[in-house]
Structure formats: structure tokens, C-alpha cells
Image (cartoon, grey):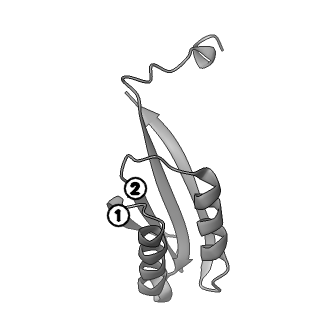
Amino acid sequence: NRLNRQPLDVDTVEVTNTVYVIAGRSQQKIALALLESLLEGADYPINDLAVHAFGSQEVEIEAKLLATSVDGEVLDALMRRLAEEPYITQAFWSPSTSD
């Protein structure tokens, strides 16, 4: 528990933000195009993109963003917009740190 309370050394830690979209396999290209368009429109360039099987009927699209400042409210709004589509079952983002 003590380790969890240690402050981060901001000079050596990089925050990576990743966006995840779960969509039907047959609609993956449409979901991917919408994700790329929304992120580009918000000036969040994608550093790495991967598509993984997610069960038998869906895929997980994983978009790692370039290390730039991220506004959580903007990303939350983008996730709500993505989740409005009937072919997208989940949309969320997650920050992570690495030394």
C-alpha cells in the first residue's frame, strides 16, 4: 500500500492513452473508420492500431494515442459518440503509465 502512495516521478514516467472499441466483426471497417475520423477531428493522432478477436462475433479495436495532452472530458464525449452507433457495443479509453 505504501508503494501505491508514492508520487510519480514525472520526468521518467510517460502516460499512454488507449482507446478501445468493441464492434461486430461484420462492421469492423465502419467502426474503425469512425474511430479514426473522430480522433483525427479532435487532434488525437493514433500511434499504434490493432484489431483483435473479441469472442466469436466481435472485434476489439485498440488505438494507442501519441503522447500528447489529453482532455478526459473530450475523450469521454468521443466515447459516448462512438457508443451511439448500433454496431458498437462498447467504447472506452484508459490511461496507463510506464517508466
Q: Amino acid at mark 2?
A: Lys
- In the picture, the disc for residue 75 is none
Question: Which label was assigned to residue 49?
Answer: 1
- Residue, x 67% and y 80% (percent of image)? 84
Which residue lies at the image location 46% right of the left edge and 86% below the top edge? 30
Give percent across and percent down for residue 83: 65, 74
Mark 1 to mark 2 CA distance (whole Å):
6 Å
Question: Going by the image, does 79 lie left or right of 49?
Answer: right
The quadrant the C terminus occupies is top left
Determine which residue is flagged by label 2.
Answer: 64
In the rendered image, the quadrant that contains the N terminus is: top right
Q: Earlier in the sequence, mark 1 or mark 2?
A: 1
Instruction: Identify the residue at horizontal 45%, vertical 72% (top origin).
Output: 41
Under mark 1, the amino acid is Leu
- Indicate whether 33 appears above or below 16: below
Q: x, y percentage for residue 92?
A: 60, 60
Give the structural element (helix, strand or loop) at label 1: strand
7 is higher (above) or lower (below) than 49: above
Q: Residues within 10 Å of mark 2 (few under 14, many from 20)?
A: many
Q: Residue 3 placed where, x, y %? A: 58, 14
Q: Where in the figure is residue 76, as x and y percent of width and height?
A: 64, 60
* Proximity of marks 1 and 2: CB atoms separated by less than 8 Å: yes
- Label 1 crowd bin: few (<14), some (14–19), many (20+), radius 10 Å: some
Q: Quadrant of residue 44?
A: bottom left
